[in-house]
Image: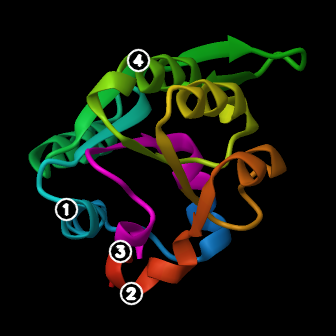
Amino acid sequence: MLHKFKKGRVYVFIDAENVFYSQRTLGWKISYQKLMQYFKKECGNDTKCFIYSGKDEHNIKQSKFLDMLEINGYTVCTKVIKKIKNREGGYHWKNNLDIELAFEMDDMKNQYDTAVLISGDSDFATPIDRIKKAGKQIIVMSTRGHISKELLERAKFIDLRKIREEISQK
């Protein structure tokens, strides 16, 4: 399906936090091994995939997950998550790399012809506008219920449900 909409060299930018929450809505998990195979099949072996994720240095399970991504050909971009005290005296975790993803998607625009963004976050509306202004194709992959109207207005949208058979864990 993706090959119908892409042109030239393809770079994929994945917002891991957004995918994590999308999977809850979907009710099934994405196999990152299958996702990489899907991109290689649809876009060619020279396709580059970048994934952006917060990192808990004490979480062994997460470290193994990030290692698996690298083994499968992803370029993993991380930063340490922050523990922030809230008004109730408890803590919450800050785990967001949207700015890094947006800057890198813009900084690398001369290296690709099509950018695939896997996220539904409206924060990416302005970076998408900048990339389109540079003459690049933009495709957004997410799922209904996790994609902002700002992204739907700016880019070709592919619902992850349409490629479930090719990318889901069994």
Residue 8 located within the stretch drawn in magenta: yes
**Position of 162 relative to 120 (above/below):** below
Q: For mark 1, what is the residue?
A: 40
Measured as percent of width and height from the top left, residue 61 is found at: 30, 45
Question: In screen coordinates, is 13 left or right of 75?
Answer: right
**Position of 164 relative to 152 (above/below):** below
Q: Nearer the viewer, residue 65 or 52?
A: 52
Instruction: Give the quadrant of the N terminus.
Output: bottom left
Proximity of marks 2 and 1: CB atoms separated by less than 8 Å: no
Front label number (3 vs 1): 1
In three-dimensional space, the C-alpha distance between marks 3 and 1, rounded to whole angstroms, equals 12 Å
Direction right: furthest residue: 87
| Pointer 1 or 4: first along the chain | 1
Question: In screen coordinates, is 111 left or right of 106?
Answer: left
Q: Identify the image quadrant of residue 75.
A: top left
Marks counted in the figure total 4
